[in-house]
Image (tube, rainbow, N blue to C red):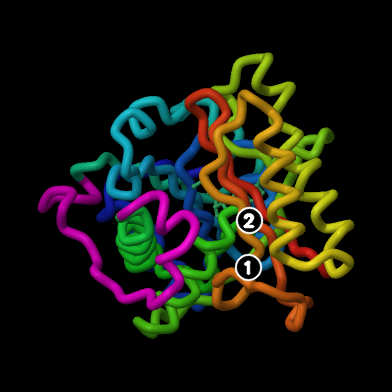
Amino acid sequence: MEEFSTITETRNYLSEFLANGKSIGFVPTMGALHAGHLSLISRSKSENDLTVCSIFVNPTQFNNKEDLQNYPRTMARDAVVLREAGCDLLFAPSATEMYPEGESAGLALDFGKLDKVMEGKFRPGHFSGVATIVDKLLAIVKPTRAYFGKKDFQQLTIIRHMVKTLDIPVEIVASEIVREPDGLAMSSRNMRLTIAERNIAPKIYQVLAKLKEKSGKVPVPELREWAMKKIREVPEFRLDYLEIGDNESLQPVSNWSHKSRAMAFIAVFLGDVRLIDNIELFL
Ligand code: AMP
């Protein structure tokens, strides 16, 4: 596996593959890799000639300084894991490599209503930071396909929107959420949970799974109230949002008239760790 920290090295190395018409699969990450990330790597490997992974804890998408400082960083281990997974190139730049003009230089795209809800509402500026870094990384790697997890469903939707708006020539591939055996969605942030918190965390998915079971049988507002109550019954949780929304517009729905598109989304603090998850209700 090649390991580069500069844009020039990465571009130079990949230009030969591009010139020879090889397909490049790209998996952008913030590191602290787990089986969720590796599922994207393995899918990319099966669908492309070459797989590139980036590891960059992007400062511009953190609206909270402490969250950025506390974000887990396990670079040495990540490189070993990627090598074992058969990744061909790891691009791990510094913040100054990615933002030579300073971190305030960002994309100001109009996402319409997509970033006015959920993560966009609770983390101001987050998606502008995400769009900026993903746009820059796509311009460096020029992948045939880029892989994103449904774990960050709103992010996936916003990236699809950006790629369409800016006519970026890449296929966006969405991959299923990888969960721990007890249902907890895998996340780099899970590493920061205490043992007691880790034991409580699966309750998030248990509530989503129950919500799915009840979907269509109970009116939407009632079901949402029920699920919020279940989360609030656990004193260690602090709920940011629980929404039942449309998988295209991401806007809240009030009835089951387009039920095949209905999803539930949640963000909850457990201690100082913020966890997100979602579930497709009728698929
Ligand atoms: P991150 O390193 O958290 O920015 O995630 C990098 C990519 O991995 C994003 O496309 C995420 O949606 C995806 N990802 C993170 N966790 C999971 C998971 N549990 N299952 C599937 N994909 C995931």
Q: Which residues are magenta?
A: 97-124
Going 41% across and 66% down the picture, which residue do you hit?
116
Residue 161's place in the image compared with 57, above or below, is below
Q: Relative to residue 147, is residue 258 drawn left or right?
A: right
Q: Position of residue 152 (x, y in %)?
A: 56, 55
Give the CA separation, mark 2 to mark 1: 7 Å
Q: Residues within 10 Å of mark 2 (few under 14, many from 20)?
A: many
**Amino acid type for the residue under numbered disc 1:** Gly
Q: Please, what is the three-letter code of the amino acid marked with disc 2?
A: Phe
- SS type, badge 1: strand
Q: Where in the figure is residue 36, as x and y percent of width and height?
A: 66, 45
Residue 110 magenta: yes
- Report which residue position mark 2 lands on: 265
Q: Earlier in the sequence, mark 2 or mark 1?
A: 1
Residue 245: mark: 1
- For image coordinates 83% across by 69% down, the residue present is 282
Q: Which mark is residue 269?
A: none
Q: Residue at x 10, y 53 (%)?
A: 101
- Give the dominant element type of the magenta stretch: helix, strand or loop: loop
- What x and y, as percent, mark residue 53? 50, 50
Check disc 1: other Cα within 10 Å, few if <14, some if 14-19, many if 20+. Answer: many
